[in-house]
Amino acid sequence: MGEIVTKLKGSIVALVTPFKEGKIDEKSFRNLIQWHLKEGTHALLVSGTTGESATLTDEEKKRLFEIALEEAKGKVPLIAGTGTNDTAKTLKLTKMAEEMGMDAVLLVTPYYNKPTQKGLYEHYKYIATNTQIPIILYNVPGRTAVNLLPDTVAKLAKYPNIVAIKEACGDLKQVSELLLSCPQEFVVLSGDDFTAYATVVLGGKGVISVAANVMPKEMAQFMNAALEGNHHKARELHYYLYPLFKILFIETNPVPAKEALYLMGMIDTPEVRLPLTGLSENSFDQLKKVLREIYKLI
């Protein structure tokens, strides 16, 4: 448990799931993993929100985990997105990831149900006491309609396999309270590229990143500089990457990221699954402009 916890830091990419004609594009997915290993990404998240987990079948998630294990096991930490709004299903997926040999799981707060803090606590407690795999909590109120509060996280951090949180509330006050409330060894990761640098300055260990899909080397360098206390370089990279952070959320994530990877020739199609749809013409033009004029990626 301790070894994997120390490696949960830096730039952790929330990988997109490439599709072709409605199915997982396994070749493109393998190529993306190999690219991230080459570019210095510190860890890989498979089947997270950016991976369109909500519209993946259990069999597809299993296949993605298999490919990730084949390509990267022992090279970087592999995190499986197994959270759902159904506690029993979350346990089933988490056990599957554990049995397959994934290094950790990311569990989003149950969405739509709108559980109380007690409900959130009981949900995570149930998963933690029925598994042994390291668990990363995931708080993203903007998508789930519930906010996992620092006091609740501190109570959950007492379970030995609840080791970290991806905090995407966007509120640095809450991040500060989280760091004050939880044990020193508990890992706090930004869930938002915009707040990655500030989170590390406050005491966090890195970011689970969308932007790392498009510029993995630069995101790894950015987080390395921040963690090393090289604030001049970290600030420089923050502002260099800032236009990318913005353009990747011009429409719903991961639509812009997939379009960017397609334009860069990294995936064969920018296909997303309904209810997501491709970028509007205006957003597509803005994305192309940023990639071409600022970053020279296309």
Image (spheres, rainbow, N blue to C red):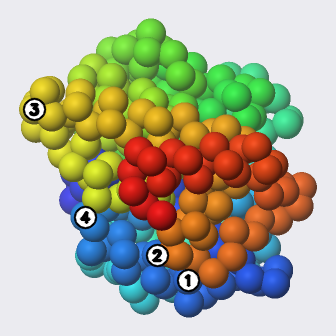
The amino acid pointed to by label 1 is Ser
- CA gap between label 1 and label 4 equals 18 Å
Crowd around label 3: few <14 · some 14–19 · many ≥20 (10 Å): few
Question: On the rendered structure, is 58 left or right of 97?
Answer: right
Mark 2 to mark 4 CA distance (whole Å):
12 Å
Q: Which residue is mark 4?
A: 40
Q: Which residue is mark 2?
A: 32
Q: CA distance from mark 3 to mark 1?
A: 35 Å
Q: Residues within 10 Å of mark 2 (few under 14, many from 20)?
A: many
Whichever of labels 4 and 3 marks the residue nearer the N terminus, that label is 4
| In the rendered image, the vertical position of residue 297 relative to residue 56, given as above or below | above
Q: Are marks 2 and 1 in contact (CB under 8 Å)?
A: yes
Q: Describe residue 111's horizontal placement relative to residue 165 as left or right.
A: right
Question: SS at mark 2?
Answer: helix
Mark 2–mark 1 distance (CA, rounded to whole Å) = 6 Å
Residue that label 1 marks = 28
Give the structural element (helix, strand or loop) at label 3: loop
Relative horizontal placement of residue 286, taking residue 152 as reference (left or right): right
Q: Secondary structure at mark 1?
A: helix
Name the amino acid type tagged 2. Leu
User: First in sequence: mark 3 or mark 1?
Assistant: 1
